[in-house]
Image (cartoon, helix red, strand yellow):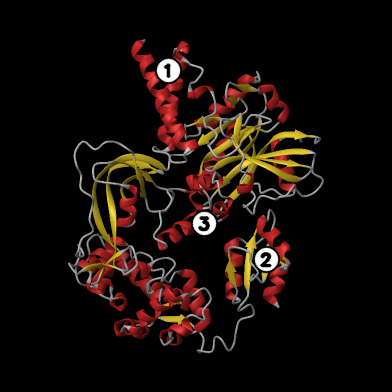
Amino acid sequence: MTDTAECAAQLRALLHHHAHRYYVLDAPEIPDAEYDRLFQELQAIEASIPELRTPDSPTQRVMGQVLPGLMPVKHALPMLSIQTETDTTAAGAENFDGRVRRELALPEDAPPLEYAAELKFDGLAINLRYEHGVLVQAATRGDGETGEDVTQNIRTIGQIPLRLRGDAPPVLEVRGEVYMRRDDFDRLNERQREKGEKTYINPRNTAAGAVRQLDPAVTAQRPLSFFAYGLGDVQGWPLPPTHSALLDAIAAFGLPVCADRTVAGGAAGLTAFHAAMGARRDGLPFDIDGVVYKVNSLELQRRLGFKTREPRWAVAHKYPAQEQMTRLNGIEIQVGRTGKLTPVAKLEPVFVGGTTVSNATLHNLFELRRKGVRVGDTVIVRRAGDVIPEVVGRVPAVRPVYVPNFRMPRECPVCASPARRERGGMDYRCTGGLFCAAQRKQALLHFAGRRAMDIEGLGDKIVDQLVDAGIVRTLPELYRLGVANLAALERMADKSAANLVAALEASKRTTLSRFIYALGIRQVGEATAKDLARHFGSMDRLMDASVEQLLEVNDVGPIVAQSIQQFFAQPHHREIVEQLRAAGLNWDEGDGTADLSPKPLAGRTVVLTGTLPTLSRDEAKELLEAAGAKVAGSVSKKTSYVVAGTEAGSKLDKAVELGIPVLDEDGLRALLAG
């Protein structure tokens, strides 16, 4: 009993420490999955020995405190958390459905219950108070009873309306999540790197820190988003009968509600939703760590009520954790396609994000120093979808022995050419160019990629053998390969060799933008390649362009222009283009008069928002780009048209505010036809 009591006390102290780091300082030291494990361990002890449950136990209340410097706000209705179901299999949904049916005393032959199923966003919970339709206050969850006043910061988020649409009630408190999209987070970190400033660990902590800034001007510089998912205090407005109808009503007031939700029947419906969203999780534009199930009927919710700190009618069903802790065993250098030297963490293998990870990027020496990571440390590893696993930080601990800081090598570890840091930059690069086998390999893989020349079957192992054996040294030599060359490679059968030769032949017919992207010019991504192809219309015009002419291209700045000009100023790069042309590559291009014969929407910028009846976002984008338009992600004064479908959000509001023409799908088709 004494040992168990001490264990419970230690767990309470540890959970209080980590909750303070997470909720108050927005600087967690351990992944969410590790916190959940410690919390469940304490729950199990208290369940088996109830007398060890103390009033200050983390299991007895929602965690968090008011941050000094922000005014406290007493919630009219408590903002409680919901129970977490960590069994990531179908059993998680079945367990919840079984508990609800037992609480309602339903017989076994009763029909399936109706549930509302939605996403569990990874952000910061917010309560928005509207009085007579006007936003008067915004507050964080805090400890569930008292939060922090962040009204001025929340007003900087464009998705949150300052006035509700329609006939709003005297008082309506809307609860939801402030979060940061992955693409916004990546762009923010890229800007931070360019300025030589610290980068952020993950979108959740960045969003939370931005909301709780004391200076709203700082918050305004952070690209925050919002989804509503429920209500708090409501006065003078009859509630709908179901949670799903309640969300529809919230959306009608002009607040963003996530479209990825459904009404599900019984455990089977919940399981199907969990599986479907799990399959789509990596492709979502924002982070989720699970889905949420709620009994749809508000009357049944009232009957089920609450237990201590959680409603009986809701549960969060999690997915495998995307962050885990492991040991850093060493640091090696990887040489990329452009010669960039990247420090790579060699890890004690750990299961994270649905797969076993043993390597993770450390980005560059400056990031490595900022995170204070050294060999032997326990580190936090993050993996989300197809994103390369990265070390996001170390778990603070006293090192038993002195460990020196990692230093970048003076020579390329592959070809021994000098490695130098660019003036004013943070990256070290090998100066060997295509003399370096690593750069040759990466250049070939990039060239063969799906978004470039799309050469199916030309993967890592084959490229390794082709380069290591000296069979392929340049891009044009790929098109001199025959079945005999390839069949001689290890584990390459005649049929596989013939398929690869056929794929190489098929790749000869491509587009100008794909070919430009495939060349691997530094600073030139897919979007820039499309802009260059549209502007110049031919490869020859692009190769002969001056920096001044390149600066005329949409979104091409001095750095990108200089990089393109320097690339084609090197004779061997021009020779590669001519050799590829001689090998039979045929990229669709104009006659050099692209600017003289513009496409119907050349020079126009279009923004897509919402869901169109028959066209997917990608299909609409392809049609617009084929007509010469640029498809942008945000609305500005430079936007020519906004194409809006159902559940269009703040982009539509911004278009109306700026007086920009708004089209539906029929209008889009008419525009393309006209």
Q: Which residue occupies the foreground of this view, 488 or 470?
A: 470
Mark yes or no: residue 498 visible: no
In primary-sequence order, the first of circles 2 and 3 is 3
Name the residue rendered at 52%, 32% in the picture: 64
Which residue is identified by label 2? Answer: 642
Q: Say which element carries label 1.
A: helix
How many residues crowd mark 2 within 10 Å: few (<14), some (14–19), many (20+)?
A: many
- Vertical comparison of 393 with 234: above or below: below
Name which residue type carries label 1.
Answer: Ile
Q: Is residue 567 left or right of residue 120?
A: left
Picture quadrant where residue 443 is located: bottom left
How many labels, in total?
Answer: 3
Which residue is identified by label 1? Answer: 45
Name the residue rendered at 46%, 78% in the picture: 512
Picture quadrant where residue 451 is located: bottom left
In contact (CB < 8 Å): disc 2 and disc 3? no
In contact (CB < 8 Å): disc 1 and disc 2? no
